[in-house]
Amino acid sequence: MPLTSPAPGPPSSARVAAAVRHAVGAGLLGESRPVAGFIDADGVRDSVAALQDAFAATPGVLHTFAAKAASLVPVLRLLADSGMGCEVASPGELRIALDAGFAPSVIVLDSPAKTRDEIRQALALGVTLNADSLDEVHRIDSLRPRGAPSVIGMRVNPQVGSGSIGAMSTATATSKFGVALRDPGARKRVVQAFADHSWLTQLHAHVGSQGCSLELIAAGVAETYRLAEEINETLGTRQITSIDIGGGLPVNFDDDSVRPTFAAYAAALRTAVPGLFDGRYRLVTEFGRSLLAKNGFIGALVEYTKDAGGRRVALTHAGAQIATRTVFMPEAWPLRAGAFDAEGRPKGGPLLVQDVAGPCCFAGDVIAHARKLPELQEGDFVVLYDTGAYYFSTPWSYNSLPRPAVYGFSVAGDGSGGDAVRFAPVRDAQSLDSIAEESGAGHADSLLALGLRSGR
Ligand SMILES: *Cc1c(COP(=O)(O)O)cnc(C)c1O
């Protein structure tokens, strides 16, 4: 086996089981810490290695991680240390990418609403920018100092269609992202923009995320490649030197297996767009979910159980504040749930149809509907698998619920017992002082003194 292949570690659910048992034993999960997120640090490194391997035949690929998928500085630093760059889409993401240690030259700024200040800052730092519209190209032109070191690209929307989740589909006819290539006259205007601005040297497309097939994503990348070829031919020079193919590889949420793999995606791209890999273009990727989802889980205490209308309901501390998409779109974002006992061991026994509900005060706050699980009891734990991307790293502050703590972990052994597990802090649980401060406690009296009407 070549040295670059990651060693096939124990299956992720075995590592999760070891981590849950040790987290409960160490008090990271329990009565006073009823919910937390966990990141498998070895798994993250393995996923990065699998991505790098899939593109290894093409030199000089810049793999960036989409920061919004796990916006946690220690996670970003682990990715930086593994050789990744970082894709950011807001001043906050740019700040934490810099704090995590990414060099500006491996940071890519994508956002459909960059302010003049954000553009100035990115240009001053030498961060790569992808303009989201022709108007933004003009704005960059007016702000760009001569000889600015930033690579500057243009995002296009190849309009190849929708995947199975509308809100995740960025290449529909009316998507808000990029320059819509198939609109009348658009292609000509794009070519003209490159002709007018020799500093435009990159094309970018991100054809959608979860719910989009490999074929749909590859079709969008192929369309972008054809446009790059057309522009370079029209201009008679190889002005476009890099193509940013975005991220969007979907994740399997049904079981432990990683599918599609990065290797399968690279193979699909090689078939659809062979010219992309012949070294004439520097490639940039921007994967998020496919790198992190299967490398994280949520653990939550079962506080109570009850029966209602013939249904058993387990009331846990994992709800919409930590699994927002799943609660609001349960059909599109189902999660695997696991039952663990009060010592953090996987529960056995007969299966019972149960709802797993969260702590938020609205009736729809249910993370698993009518799920067959071993009977949950007060003091047990529920694990939500594959939540390493876009879940605990992106909490929602509904009901003034605190952001839960996040821990990294590493498992030595095969996960079958007797193994050593080490934890490291990633993010502290939010304090009540912090909640009060975010809720305007520093301005507590401000509305009392506001009245302009007489007598107040
Ligand atoms: C969200 C996003 C990504 C990452 O998408 P995943 O589905 O998490 O891989 C990449 N590029 C852009 C521009 C994005 O908005």
Image (cartoon, rainbow, N blue to C red):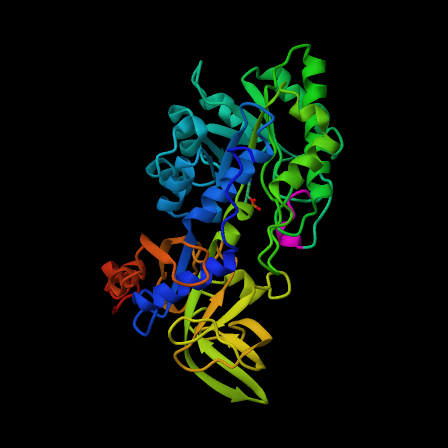
Residue pictured at 36% horizontal, 62% vertical? 404
In-image side of 231 versus 243 (left or right): right
The magenta segment is 165-171
| Residue 418: x %, y % from top left | 38, 62
Residue extending farthest top: 236
Q: Looking at the image, which is closer to me, 187 or 450? A: 187
| 168 vs 234: above or below | below
| Residue 107: x %, y % from top left | 45, 32
Q: Quadrant of the C terminus?
A: bottom left
Residue 113 visible in the current orientation: no
214 is within the stretch colored magenta: no
Which quadrant would residue 35 be assigned to in this image?
A: bottom left
| Residue 69: x %, y % from top left | 49, 48
| Residue 285: x %, y % from top left | 56, 34
Residue pictured at 76% horizontal, 32% vertical? 184
Q: Quadrant of the N terminus?
A: top right
